């Protein structure tokens, strides 16, 4: 699942991830979307998607976070280390 993705980025990623179930959103990740996709194992986000403790806890199967930006200030690294 990828958030804050432009259409051209989705096209490129889609061409490389044909064998996977992938969801694309132009908006930032919200708690309601995180809960809707609670089975997500890989998550790609941009800097505006705040990966808070609450959001991370709502996605218990999450194994990998890919940030499409420089830095990780928008990701609760302390919560990530707990899993």
Image (cartoon, rainbow, N blue to C red):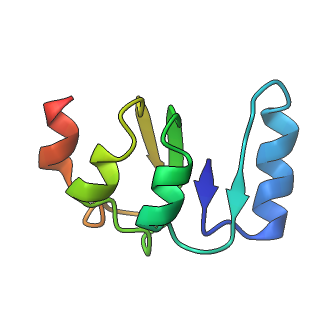
Q: Quadrant of residue 31?
A: bottom left
**Side of 58 relative to 48 (left or right):** left
User: Quadrant where the C terminus lies?
Assistant: top left
Q: Is residue 68 visible?
A: no
Q: Quadrant of residue 25?
A: bottom right
Residue 21 spot, x, y in % from top left: 75, 34
Residue 53 spot, x, y in % from top left: 21, 55
Residue 48 spot, x, y in % from top left: 44, 75
**Number of marks:** 0
Q: Nearer the viewer, residue 28 or 70?
A: 28
- Tell me what residue is drawn at x 74 percent, y 70 percent: 6
- Tell me what residue is drawn at x 48 percent, y 41 percent: 38
Q: Nearer the viewer, residue 12 or 75?
A: 75
Q: Is residue 24 above or below residue 1?
A: below
Q: Is residue 75 above or below residue 48?
A: above
**Side of 28 relative to 82 (left or right):** right
Q: Is residue 7 visible?
A: yes
**Side of 70 relative to 11 (left or right):** left
Q: Nearer the viewer, residue 15 or 34?
A: 34
**Side of 75 relative to 20 (left or right):** left
- Tell me what residue is drawn at x 53 percent, y 72 percent: 28
Q: Quadrant of residue 22?
A: top right
Q: Is residue 20 above or below residue 53?
A: above
Q: Nearer the viewer, residue 18 or 72?
A: 18
Residue 82 spot, x, y in % from top left: 14, 33
């Amino acid at each position: 699942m990828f958030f804050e993705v432009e259409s051209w980025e989705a096209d490129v990623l889609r061409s490389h991830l044909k064998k996977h179930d992938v969801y694309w959103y132009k908006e930032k990740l919200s708690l309601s979307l995180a809960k809707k996709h609670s089975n997500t194992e890989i998550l790609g986000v941009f800097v505006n998607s705040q990966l808070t403790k609450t959001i991370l806890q709502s996605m218990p199967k999450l194994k990998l976070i890919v940030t499409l930006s420089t830095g990780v200030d928008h990701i609760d690294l302390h919560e990530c280390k707990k899993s």
